[in-house]
Amino acid sequence: MSNLRLVQRGSSEDNKRAMKPPKQLYVVLIAYMLLLLVSCAHQPIPEAYDPPGFFMGLWNGLTIFFALIGHLFDNSIRIYAFPNSGGWYDFGFFLGACIFGGGGGSVASS
């Protein structure tokens, strides 16, 4: 009898690696599932005569901490106005909250 060995073309680790889907596929699937999930979300249509705009958003952003403390004791106190004017109110709110919180300036200087 001769000593014949069967030679495999690749190890089992190579086969497992070849069968594994790429990581990009997982990222695409997760992004698709999130998009599918949030596509069902909607906001009610704001019906207001004079909705708050940029400056009221700025004020609400500056007083966010105090409004949060007040909201703990009284549910009628809100930290965010609804209905509002949309993007400008949001920008003012964000800007006010950043100014109140320091805007990350202390982190950037160290």
Image (tube, rainbow, N blue to C red):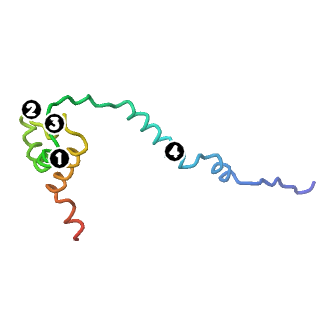
**Disc 3 designates what residue?**
51
Amino acid tagged 4: Tyr
Q: Position of residue 76 (x, y in %)?
A: 9, 32
Check disc 2 and report its element: helix, strand or loop.
loop
How far apart in space, not on screen, are marks 3 and 1 (Cα)?
A: 10 Å
- Which numbered circle lies on residue 76? 2
How far apart in space, not on screen, are marks 4 and 2 (Cα)?
A: 43 Å
Q: Nearer the viewer, residue 16 or 107?
A: 107
Counting residues from the start of the chain, the first of labels 4 and 3 encountered is 4
Quarter of the image that includes the C terminus:
bottom left
- At x 70%, y 54%, the residue is 11
**Disc 1 designates what residue?**
54
Disc 4 or disc 2, which is closer to the eye?
Answer: 2
Counting residues from the start of the chain, the first of labels 3 and 2 encountered is 3
Please determine whether, in this image, residue 107 is positioned above or below residue 70.
below
State the residue lying farthest toward the right.
Answer: 1
Amino acid tagged 3: Pro
How far apart in space, not on screen, are marks 1 and 4 (Cα)?
A: 40 Å
How far apart in space, not on screen, are marks 4 and 3 (Cα)?
A: 42 Å
- At x 20%, y 65%, the residue is 105
Q: Residues within 10 Å of mark 4 (few under 14, many from 20)?
A: few
Residues marked 1 and 2 touching at CB (< 8 Å) = no
**Disc 4 designates what residue?**
26
Q: Position of residue 13 (x, y in %)?
A: 65, 52
Q: Nearer the viewer, residue 51 or 1?
A: 51
How far apart in space, not on screen, are marks 3 and 2 (Cα)?
A: 18 Å
Check disc 4 and report its element: helix, strand or loop.
helix
Disc 4 or disc 3, which is closer to the eye?
Answer: 3
Q: Residues within 10 Å of mark 3 (few under 14, many from 20)?
A: some
Residue 74 placement, left or right of 49: left
Counting residues from the start of the chain, the first of labels 1 and 2 encountered is 1
How far apart in space, not on screen, are marks 1 and 2 (Cα)?
A: 22 Å
